[in-house]
Amino acid sequence: MTPLYDRDGWIWQDGEWREWRDATVHLFTHTLHYGMGCFEGVRAYAGPSGTHLFRAAEHTRRLVESAHSLDMPLPFSEADLIEAQRECLAKNNLSNAYLKPTVFSGLKAWGYVPRGSPPM
């Protein structure tokens, strides 16, 4: 079995597509140390007219609201996030999949409340 870090594919990170192996975060990322972050689980299913995200709008709204509750304003609209999920399926040639959109804090600040540290 191929390890997760040694795969082909694409990941949408900070609004850009990165090859799977090049998508990294720093060891001192705030979320790793303090646990402040949020995620959603979004299923995609193959159907007669192509692959469809199950309740993408509802899952994405919940992700955005979770980030807002943590005072992590996102630089992307809900439509941008849904489009990125659709592109992820297409770029990775997935028809039945589980996506896990994740928001976490970066490196610009340290402490319990990382003011000025952009969500990633």
Image (spheres, grey):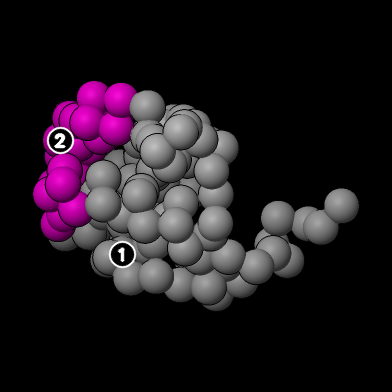
SS at mark 2?
A: helix
The magenta stretch is 55-80
- Frontmost residue, 65 versus 20: 20
Image position of 61 with respect to 117: above or below: above
Q: Position of residue 32 (x, y in %)?
A: 48, 48
Q: Residue at x 39, y 61 (%)?
A: 12
Looking at numbered disc 1 in the image, what kind of residue is underneath it?
Answer: Asp
- Frontmost residue, 85 versus 93: 93
Q: Main secondary structure of the magenta part?
A: helix
Q: Residue at x 40, y 38 (%)?
A: 49
Determine which residue is flagged by label 1. 14
Looking at the image, tell me whether mark 1 or mark 2 is earlier in sequence order.
1
Separation of marks 1 and 2 at Cα, in angstroms: 17 Å
Q: Is residue 96 left or right of residue 88?
A: right
Q: Nearer the viewer, mark 1 or mark 2?
A: 1
SS at mark 1?
A: loop
Residue 33 visible in the picture: no
Determine which residue is flagged by label 2. 68
Q: Position of residue 114 (x, y in %)?
A: 24, 51
Q: Is residue 10 left or right of residue 54?
A: right
Residue 7 visible in the picture: yes
